[in-house]
Amino acid sequence: MNDIKFTHDIMQEHEVERYFKIWRESVIRSRLTITAVFLKTANATQLNENVNDQVTSFLQSKIRKTDLLFQLSDGDHWGIFFLQSSDVEARAFLKRIFAILKAERKFQQIALKASITEIRNNNVIFEELLNKNKQMLSGDEQLTWSIAEVKDYCEQPTELVKVSIIEQNAIFRQVLESTLKQINIPYFSLDVKVYEDGYSFLQSDDYKSGHMHLILMNDILPLKNGLEILHILRHMPNEKKFIIYMMSERNSEGAALNAYEGGVDEYIVKPFNLRLLEAKIKRTFARFWQ
């Protein structure tokens, strides 16, 4: 293992707060999971400044480029923000660096303890986050080389999803509406609306909201058909918010290829099993919180 070079080049608590506020909002908008790790030397009062530098340099050498290491204002704690990483990955990181520190003779003066906070909602204030973890690490009952956990911010929020069913057949339209209203998808709430043709859908302006939007439409429709609507939606600036399922009676490779090239996410041939449709929708949304 290479020798650690001492350095004071580390971000401080007040510098990190503004970045955290941006990341916190991205937890909802971009489904960005943040995991915060806090570390403290178990024998801080007995250590000199040289050892603090050694810990700082060691941590700098082990984090990834996407991680952010900083020092708290009291000088006794370190924080690391892992972006798009769960508590499982953070715990694995801590176990790995603990093993290195305990095995290397040059680090024999160092004994650490740590806490982990996984953040999956934006109901968190930076100062509150720091204080909760500092309190967790302050107790003498926490053993050296142990990992505590703050679970106050790990509950995932419920996100509203717009759902539009565009189907000419009134009976089938009603069946689809009933099916989608009964689907239970963790962390998502579905607002279902139905339209008998493409023109009425476009006139509603409902598709212009910023919400994620599931479109379940027939390819052949009066006034504005499905392919025309597909073209309009996929040329909108925020087109990635749309999840588009196209239903069709045309069971041909050419029709399916044309639909996929136009930008549909699923091409479903009628008649189809409603349970299969439900399974496809659940799988689609499950990917957003994996």
Image (tube, rainbow, N blue to C red):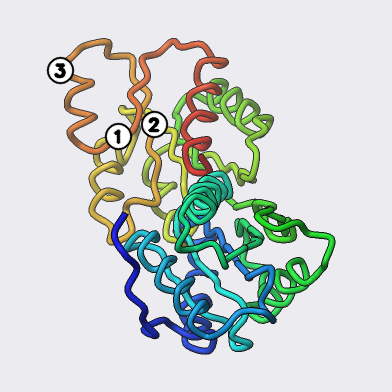
**Observer able to see residue 204:** no
**Observer able to see residue 66:** yes
| Residue located at (72% from left, 59% from top) | 150
- Reading the image, the residue beneath label 1 is 264
Label 1, label 3: how many angstroms apart (C-alpha)?
Answer: 14 Å
- Reading the image, the residue beneath label 2 is 245
Quadrant hosting residue 275: top right
| Residue closest to the eye, 261 or 28 | 28
Label 3, label 2: how many angstroms apart (C-alpha)?
Answer: 17 Å
Q: Label 1 crowding class (10 Å Cα cut-off): few <14, some 14-19, many 20+? A: many
| Amino acid type, label 3 | Gly
Q: Label 3 crowding class (10 Å Cα cut-off): few <14, some 14-19, many 20+? A: few
Position of residue 152 measured from the top left corner of the image (x, y, whole percent): 74, 60
| Amino acid type, label 1 | Val
Residue 48 versus residue 61 in the image, above or below: below
Whether pointer 2 and pointer 1 mark residues with C-beta atoms closer than 8 Å, the reply is yes
Residue 185 versus residue 6 in the image, above or below: above
Position of residue 247 measured from the top left corner of the image (x, y, whole percent): 37, 24
* Mark nearer the N terminus (2 vs 1): 2
Local secondary structure at mark 3: helix
Position of residue 9 measured from the top left corner of the image (x, y, whole percent): 36, 84
Left-right relation of 125 to 240: right
| Residue closest to the eye, 71 or 88 | 71
